[in-house]
Image (tube, rainbow, N blue to C red):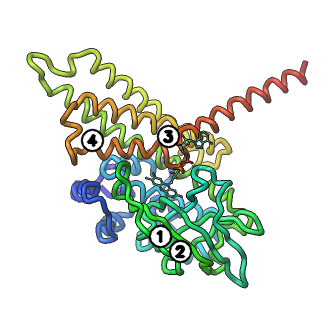
Amino acid sequence: MNPAQGHVLDPGLVEAATTWEQKRTVTREDLAPWADVGLFGLTVPTVYGGAGRTLAQAVRVHRAVAAVSPSLHSLLVVHGMVLHALYRWGSASLRSEVLPCMASGSRLGAFAVTEQESGADLTAVRTRIEPAEGAVLVTGEKRWITFGAIADVVMVLGRGSLGTTCVLVPAGSGQRTRPEPLGVGLPAAGLTAIEFSATRVPAHLVLARPGFGLPVAVSCLDHGRLFVAAGALGVAGAALELAADHAAHTRRGEVRLGEHQLVRALLADASVLLSGATALVEEAASALDTRDPQGTLLAARAKLLASRAARAATDAAGQVLGAVGLVEGHRLTRWSGAARAYQVIEGPTEVLQDLVGGALVRSAGHAAAGAGSAG
Ligand SMILES: Cc1cc2nc3c(=O)[nH]c(=O)nc-3n(C[C@H](O)[C@H](O)[C@H](O)COP(=O)(O)OP(=O)(O)OC[C@H]3O[C@@H](n4cnc5c(N)ncnc54)[C@H](O)[C@@H]3O)c2cc1C
């Protein structure tokens, strides 16, 4: 089935993608068949050549893709974040110019906020973006950029005399890239450091306006968190299915592994986390679809729980499979690595806890203040 229409993936595509994690690379040629079935324009309106799906529909595709290739899924995440930025914050002419080729997958997007000194804190970015006669000049270095070397356009967050700014930097504008390969995590995600030295970018490629970069980047992160959460569901579901199957069919002596209560407990805990996280992902997707002001918080909650579910399910599967799951190249290793990465990317677990817990404290504070004034 066409991924743009549902969440059952073509077996031929699945078979090809399962080898990418072992090769530790995904090339443009590898991606072509996925582009042909509309994977890169899922949520782009049909008027711009996309599939016009809601986020609630798109997360099912994200879930299915991550279960097959977490690295391909990570490309869908960042590409989708740039598409969101363009659609929400780009000018009408910029949308018409860029969205159709990105929706078709003939141009790929990357999302560059992280720096050596800023990490998870977007407000600490040091990359300079300064206006310069019909253009902006970008200077600085971005780290750990997913598919940064093969992307055709990189959305960069920086700051300058007007405040924070997001700009789309086309590949070949003079920036330099170097690979930053991961040992664990998403080995085929093509992580790249990108260095900008007074890189000149036409002013019409600034999103929203100079000085408004932080709201643009934060709204992209809402979508990124939702997509990562959906990917985490895919990884959790795949690992749990593997573990349950192994427990049901593996005998040690006269006893099947799945007859041990402690093995069942591992599966049970992971499965209820997965069900809870699935509900939160659906809730967050609907909120972001309707631009509900609670969307940011709901996306953070969904990503917090879904990444935990992925970690719990892959840990449980690792335990139930024993030595088999540790063999080099076993499919569980790619899900376990992805689960670790999900607890770091698009807001580490502790940053999300701070956001979610902070909202609870604020709301309790308002309630107490309200009660005080009423009394
Ligand atoms: C596979 C992968 C793909 C990535 N792709 C991209 C990409 O495409 N674009 C991009 O811009 N970046 C990308 N990154 C970078 C990623 O966004 C950062 O790793 C992430 O934001 C965390 O930053 P950091 O690693 O510098 O950790 P740090 O910010 O140094 O944080 C390290 C740890 O400190 C703790 N911590 C940090 N801040 C807080 C806080 N406020 N409260 C409590 N605890 C805190 C957390 O435990 C956190 O895990 C990618 C990273 C990985 C691993």
Amino acid of disc 3: Val
Identify which residue, 118 or 30, lies in the foreground: 118
Q: Which residue is mark 1?
A: 102
Asked if the residue at tag 2 contacts the one at tag 3, i.e. Cβ–Cβ closer than 8 Å, the answer is no
Mark 1 and mark 3 lie on one chain; the one further toward the N terminus is 1
Q: CA distance from mark 4 to mark 1?
A: 32 Å
Quadrant that contains the C terminus: top right
Q: Nearer the viewer, mark 4 or mark 1?
A: 4
Q: CA distance from mark 3 to mark 4?
A: 23 Å
User: Does residue 65 lie above or below 283 as drawn?
Assistant: below
Q: Counting other residues with Cα less than 10 Å from the Cα at mark 2, is it few (<14), some (14-19), or many (20 or more)? A: some
Q: Counting other residues with Cα less than 10 Å from the Cα at mark 4, is it few (<14), some (14-19), or many (20 or more)? A: many
Q: Which residue is mark 4?
A: 332
Is 272 placed left or right of 353 in the picture? Answer: left
Amino acid of disc 2: Val
Q: Nearer the viewer, mark 4 or mark 2?
A: 4
Asked if the residue at tag 4 contacts the one at tag 3, i.e. Cβ–Cβ closer than 8 Å, the answer is no
Quarter-of-image position of residue 331 = top left
Q: Residue drawn at (37%, 28%), measured in percent from left and top? A: 271
Residue 30: x, y in percent? 29, 66
Q: Which residue is mark 2?
A: 98
User: Does residue 312 lie above or below 13 as drawn?
Assistant: above
Mark 3 and mark 4 lie on one chain; the one further toward the N terminus is 3
Identify which residue, 38 or 74, lies in the foreground: 74
From the Cβ of disc 1, is ligand 1 less than 8 Å away? no
Q: CA distance from mark 1 to mark 3?
A: 25 Å
Q: Nearer the viewer, mark 3 or mark 4?
A: 4
